[in-house]
Amino acid sequence: MSADQSVPTREVAQRVFAAEFNDASYTFKESDDDRAPVYALLPTGERANRVFFVGTLTETDDVGDDSEYWQGRIVDPTGTFFVYAGQYQPEAASTLRELEPPAYVAVVGKPRTYETDDGSITVSVRPESITPVDAATRDRWVAETAERTLDRIEAFDDEANEYARMAREEYGEDLSAHREAVVEALDSLDDDGASDDAAEPPVDGEP
Amino acid sequence: MSELQKHAAEIAAQFSDHTDVDAEEIEQRLDQLVSEYKVPVDEARRSVTNSLLEEADMDREELGRGGAEAVLVGEIDQDEQWVDVTVQVVDLWEPRSDSIAQVGLVGDESGRTKFVAFETSDLPELEEGASYKLANVVTDEYQGDYSIKLNRTTTITELDETVEVGDDTTTVDGALVDVQSGSGLIKRCPEEGCTRVLQNGRCSEHGEVDGEFDLRIKAVLDDGRQVQDVIFNREATEELTGIGLEDAKQQAQDALDTSVVAEGIRTDIVGRYYRVTGPTLGRYVLANEFERLERPTDTAAIRAAAGVDR
């Protein structure tokens, strides 16, 4: 890449639990430009063009017809992320092909939505990368995501928060489920004493 | 610009905050003293300055030490300000344009900043490692980064003592979310002082050259609020990945492809959390020190926030 002059600012990777992410079915653009980034609207009032999450890969499946198209189920304390990688995501696809579940993985990717035959909208992730990680990284992500989610809930009533306003219109203003998800997620850590630095990483049972 | 014009501009700058004086008029007065009355320049300056003070009914103290304000480079946060700085020349770069006489980095206790001197200003050359007082320089802003421009009215005084350069070290925490192109086993231009990274065996300055292998990682740290580009040099890359330059060359040789090195690195580090500490250069933080962040630290505080909150 030699044209470093006008690098567009990179989109930040939002931290969001699976339960909230899977509800983020409303997408929008902020300009008419064909190549303008598409954002998923998070119910707690934030836009997400990229997400970062860490969870347990529980299942991989080649769901492609002619060519490989890998589906991965990645579980966090609140639900399941679905990732899909095909020929245009060769590295992520080969990771899904080669990894033996269960395994902790970190995923950087873009939210994607599609409408099913019955008209409901499914939210999934098109991965930019999937890498195997350890339990400590997973725990750190859970704590971080709990914190970021609480921050968003905290800012939900700010007058100036335009994404909260959009979220209220699209999804309603009851955030109690998301707050409960945060508490559950934190409980899953503390049961194993993960907040104690000396403790061994928790060994997750079958999710 | 003549010697006298320069002096006139400096005097005008000194008074500019207090009275409306005209550099041209000052120059005429100086010229009269110097050319007609054969007064030494210093004495002429003194005389003109004093008479201007008298005319404006000002005390010498009010004049302070010049029209430009003395600042630390780290304090510069406005475009087009006239300032004085006392700095060490940290680094000199190859000018990319014929109009530029010198370009590089200067620093003081507060940090570093880029400086540019133009050919047309006809200034004495700055030497790397030497310390100077640069009086009457102008601040400049580009995409949020500040620099200083030397100009015709800038006076350069070399100092005997060395100005200590503080490091503008920052620390960033985050998940490493991307390893960018130009990472892994790279080749640099072998020309003296060049070190540009080759693209397909070509240096953008020196054309086709026989490059020298090096190892580095350009990565992105992301904490969910903002992103920060970081660079690991060869030493840091070795420490981070355990892959040395020789290992990397061997890997590339075995695979007949240098990209396997970057791929291996990617798998090892993407998705993990790191804390990186080092100086800022442009949009990058140079990873002089780093550590892997393992366990979450303050779940108790987060729990409290989750519970107490409404």
Image (spheres, grey):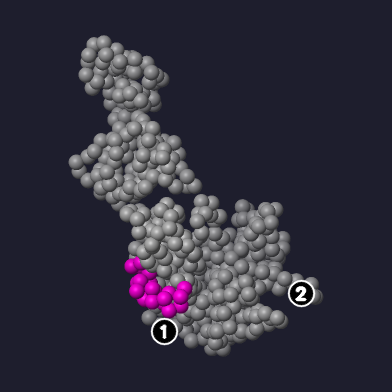
Q: Residue at x 33, y 23 (%)?
A: B2
In which quadrant is the N terminus of chain B drawn?
A: top left
Q: Residue at x 72, y 60 (%)?
A: A169
Question: Relative to residue A39, is residue B113 depicted above or below?
Answer: above
x, y percentage for residue A58?
59, 85
Image location of residue B199, percent across then percent down: 47, 60
Which residue is more in the foreground, B139 or B31?
Answer: B31
Marks 1 and 2 sit apart, C-alpha to C-alpha, by 43 Å
Circle 2 marks a residue in which chain? Answer: A
Kindly indicate the quadrant of the structure image that contains residue A72: bottom right
Q: Residue at x 31, y 37 (%)?
A: B134
- Badge 1 marks a residue whose secondary structure is loop
Q: Nearer the viewer, residue B256 or B81?
A: B256
Residue A84's place in the image compared with B154, above or below, is below
The answer to whether A148 appears left or right of B33 in the picture is right
Is residue A139 visible to the viewer in this orientation of the structure? no
Question: What residue lies at 26% left-to-right and 15% top-to-bottom?
Answer: B34
Q: Using residue A55 as the reference point, say whether residue A163 is left or right of it.
A: right
Residue A79 relative to residue B170: left or right: right
User: Amino acid under label 2?
Assistant: Thr
Instruction: Tell me the tag on residue A53.
Output: none
Say what amino acid the circle numbered 1 marks: Glu
Q: Which residue is mark 2?
A: A116
Give the image location of residue A103, x and y in percent: 53, 84
Q: Position of residue B276 (x, y in %)?
A: 39, 64
Q: Which residue is mark 1?
A: A200
Give the image quarter of residue B78.
top left
Residue extending furthest toward the bottom: A206
Give the quarter of the figure containing the C terminus of chain B.
Answer: bottom right
Q: Which residues are magenta?
A: B234-257
